[in-house]
Image (tube, rainbow, N blue to C red):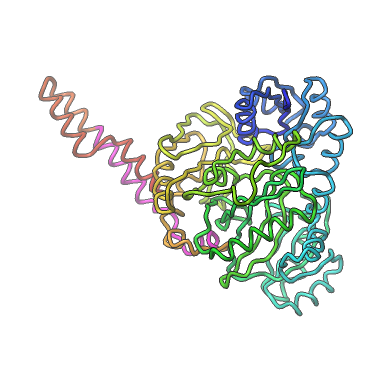
C-alpha cells in the first residue's frame, strides 16, 4: 500500500480525502495557492507546499508544479479530487510518465468520456440509450437550426467538452436559436478552450438520475445504486438524494446494468458516475460519464456503508474488489445539501468574504464535509461552496426531518449563505412529494414571493421588547427581579433567538 499520497485539490474535497488517508495510515501531502495559505486542507495535511498565486491557472492547474511537489515529497500517488486536474488526460498520462500513480481511470477512458460527442458514439455502439441528437459537433449555426427543426423544439445546445452547465443553452423556438447557439459556443470556448457544441433533443420535465460505479483493474465492475440530482440552479446541483422516489425497481435494475455496461465499454478503473435523464414514463437516456469522484458521493457512502475514497486508493494500488453486485446492499435514505456562500435573493450570486463565526450541526445520522472554519475566508478565486451537509435516516421522511433539524442548527455569520433556501426547498410540497424535476428550482423561483420585509421589523421589535423586559426585571432587583426575568424569558424568549427563528424560517 502507498505510504504517502498527494492531494491535488483544495477545500472540502481535499479535507475529505485526507481523512480517509489518515484512517488508512497513509501520510497526506497538500498543495495550496498563496490565497489558501491558511486553508483547512493545508492545516490538516502532514506536509504542505505552495504551488503559486491565487489564480487556479497558476497554481492548482499547474501539472508541472504538482508533479514537482510529488517528487520532492516522495508521494507515490496523486488523488485529484474533483474539478481542476481530475479529468485531465494529459495530467494522468504525465503522472504515469513520472512514475506516480494517478488515483483515477486511465487516460484513454478520460478522453473517451470527456469529449461528449465521442462518448455518445461509444455509448451508442455499446447499446446504451441516448437522447436524440447530433453525433458530431456542429460549426454552422444554420445547419444546426435545420437539424433542430427536424428534431422539434425545445432543444439543448451543449458544449462538447463541457460540464457544470457551462456552454449549455435551452432553446424553445427557431427564432432564438442562432443567438443561443453562438452564445453557447462563446461560453464553451471561454470555459474549456474548446468552442465545439452539439445539439440534442430537450427531454420535457426530466429527472437527473446518476448511477455510481466502481471498477477495479481486474475486470470487475459494480454499481452502487442511484442518486437523484434534479434540484439544480443554473444546471448545477444543490440538493441530492438517494434513493430516487419515482424510480421503479425494474428501471433501477436496468439503469444499473447499463451503467456497468458503459464503464466496461471504456475499460474503466476506479470510481465513476454515469448520468442519465429519466422521463415520466421511466425511459432513461445517457447524458455523460464523469470520470472522477462526484461532489455528491457521500450519500452513496451513507446508504452502502462503503468509503469510496478508500476504494479509489485500494483499486489504484492494484487490489481487486472482494465483492460482486450481489454483495452490494443499500439501507435507508440519504440527502445532501450543498452549502454555498451565495445569495439566493440575488440570482444565487457568490458571496465571498470572511466567516466570522461557524457552528456545525451534529447528532444522529449527520455528516458535515467542510473545508472552512470560524475565521476562514471564502475566496473570490474559487467555487463558493463551503461545505456539504449530509444526513442518513431509515426512510426518506425521517431523512427530510433530520436535514431540516441539521440546517436549523447550522450557524454561519459574516457571509450570506443558501441555508435558508435549503430549508425552503425541503418545505416545498413538490420536494416533499418527490415528483420534482430539473426545472424545479427555476419554477419555484418564478412562483415564489421574496421573503417578506415585514418579518425584519417584527424581529427587531421582538428584540427591543425582550431587552426592555430584561431591563425592567434587573431594575426591580432581588428575587423579584429574578422572577420577573424568568417570566420575561418564558413569555417572549431572547430577542436574538426570535430573530434567529425568523432567519431559520427563511423570512428574514
Q: Nearer the viewer, residue 127 or 75?
A: 127
- Residue 216: x %, y % from top left: 73, 43
Residue lying farthest to the left in this orientation: 480
Left or right, 353 with reference to 258? left
Q: Main secondary structure of the magenta part?
A: helix
Residue 166 location (% of width, % of height): 71, 54
> Residue 449 colored magenta?
yes
Expressed as whole percent of the image width and height from the top left, the position of residue 359 reads 45, 31
Vertical placement of residue 9 versus 193, above or below = above
Q: Nearer the viewer, residue 428 or 90?
A: 90
Count up the numbered dots: 0
Residue 209 in the image: above or below residue 85: below
Could you say which quadrant of the image residue 488 lies in?
top left
Q: Which residues are magenta?
A: 440-467
x and y percent of residue 89 in the render? 83, 44
Q: Nearer the viewer, residue 233 or 123?
A: 123
- The answer to which image quadrant residue 174 occupies is bottom right
At 49% from the left and 60% from the top, the residue drawn is 245
**What is the quadrant of the N terminus in the image?**
top right
Direction from residue 181 to residue 205 in the image, left or right: left
Which residue is most to the bottom? 150
Instruction: Answer whether residue 204 is magenta in the image.
Output: no
Compared with residue 276, is residue 355 higher up or lower down, i.e. above or below? Answer: above
Q: List the single residue furthest toward the right.
A: 97
Along the viewing direction, whichever of 491 and 89 lies nearer the viewer: 89
- Residue displayed at 72% across by 48% down: 220
In this rendering, position of residue 84 left or right of residue 18: right
Q: Residue at x 57, y 65 (%)?
A: 250
Amino acid at each position: 500500500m502507498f505510504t504517502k499520497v498527494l492531494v491535488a485539490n483544495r477545500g472540502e474535497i481535499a479535507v475529505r480525502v485526507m481523512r480517509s488517508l489518515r484512517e488508512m495510515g497513509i501520510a497526506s501531502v497538500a498543495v495550496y495557492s498563496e490565497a489558501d495559505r491558511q486553508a483547512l486542507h493545508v492545516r490538516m495535511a502532514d506536509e504542505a507546499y505552495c504551488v503559486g498565486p491565487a489564480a487556479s491557472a497558476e497554481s492548482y492547474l499547474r501539472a508541472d508544479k504538482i508533479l514537482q511537489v510529488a517528487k520532492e515529497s516522495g508521494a507515490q500517488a496523486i488523488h485529484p479530487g474533483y474539478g481542476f486536474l481530475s479529468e485531465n488526460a494529459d495530467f494522468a498520462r504525465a503522472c504515469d510518465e513520472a512514475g506516480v500513480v494517478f488515483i483515477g481511470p486511465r487516460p484513454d477512458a478520460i478522453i473517451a468520456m470527456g469529449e461528449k460527442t465521442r462518448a455518445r458514439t461509444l455509448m451508442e455502439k455499446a447499446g446504451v440509450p441516448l437522447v436524440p441528437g447530433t453525433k458530431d459537433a456542429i460549426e454552422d449555426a444554420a445547419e444546426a437550426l435545420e437539424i433542430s427543426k427536424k428534431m422539434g423544439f425545445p432543444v439543448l445546445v451543449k458544449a462538447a467538452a463541457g460540464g457544470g452547465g457551462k456552454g449549455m443553452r435551452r432553446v424553445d423556438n427557431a427564432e432564438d436559436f442562432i443567438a443561443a447557439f453562438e452564445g453557447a459556443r462563446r461560453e464553451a470556448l471561454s470555459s474549456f478552450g474548446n468552442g465545439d457544441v452539439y445539439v440534442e433533443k430537450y427531454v420535457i420535465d426530466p429527472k437527473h438520475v446518476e448511477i455510481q460505479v466502481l471498477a477495479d483493474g481486474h475486470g470487475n465492475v459494480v454499481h452502487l445504486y442511484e442518486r437523484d440530482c434534479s434540484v439544480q440552479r443554473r444546471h448545477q446541483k444543490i440538493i441530492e438524494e438517494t434513493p430516487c422516489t419515482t424510480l421503479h425497481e425494474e428501471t433501477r435494475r436496468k439503469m444499473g446494468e447499463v451503467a456497468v455496461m458503459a464503464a466496461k465499454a471504456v475499460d474503466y478503473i476506479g470510481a465513476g458516475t454515469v448520468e442519465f435523464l429519466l422521463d415520466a414514463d421511466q425511459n432513461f437516456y445517457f447524458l455523460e460519464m464523469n470520470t472522477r469522484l462526484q461532489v455528491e458521493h457521500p450519500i452513496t457512502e451513507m446508504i452502502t456503508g462503503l468509503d469510496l475514497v478508500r476504494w479509489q486508493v485500494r483499486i489504484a494500488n492494484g487490489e481487486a474488489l472482494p465483492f460482486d453486485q450481489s454483495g452490494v446492499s443499500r439501507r435507508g435514505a440519504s440527502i445532501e445539501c450543498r452549502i454555498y456562500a451565495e445569495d439566493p435573493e440575488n440570482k444565487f450570486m457568490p458571496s465571498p468574504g470572511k466567516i466570522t463565526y461557524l457552528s456545525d450541526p451534529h447528532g444522529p445520522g449527520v455528516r458535515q464535509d467542510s473545508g472552512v472554519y470560524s475565521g476562514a475566508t471564502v475566496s473570490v478565486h474559487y467555487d463558493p461552496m463551503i461545505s456539504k451537509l449530509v444526513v442518513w435516516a431509515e426512510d426518506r421522511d425521517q431523512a427530510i426531518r433530520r436535514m431540516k433539524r441539521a440546517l436549523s442548527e447550522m450557524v454561519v455569520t459574516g457571509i450570506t449563505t443558501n441555508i435558508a433556501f435549503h430549508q425552503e426547498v425541503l418545505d416545498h410540497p413538490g420536494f416533499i412529494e418527490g415528483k420534482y424535476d430539473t426545472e424545479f428550482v427555476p419554477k419555484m423561483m418564478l412562483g415564489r414571493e421574496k421573503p417578506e420585509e415585514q418579518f425584519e421589523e417584527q424581529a427587531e421589535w421582538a428584540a427591543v421588547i425582550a431587552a426592555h423586559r430584561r431591563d425592567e426585571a434587573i431594575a426591580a432587583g432581588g428575587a423579584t427581579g429574578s422572577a420577573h426575568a424568568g417570566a420575561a424569558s418564558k413569555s417572549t424568549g431572547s430577542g436574538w433567538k426570535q430573530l434567529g427563528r425568523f432567519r431559520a424560517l427563511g423570512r428574514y
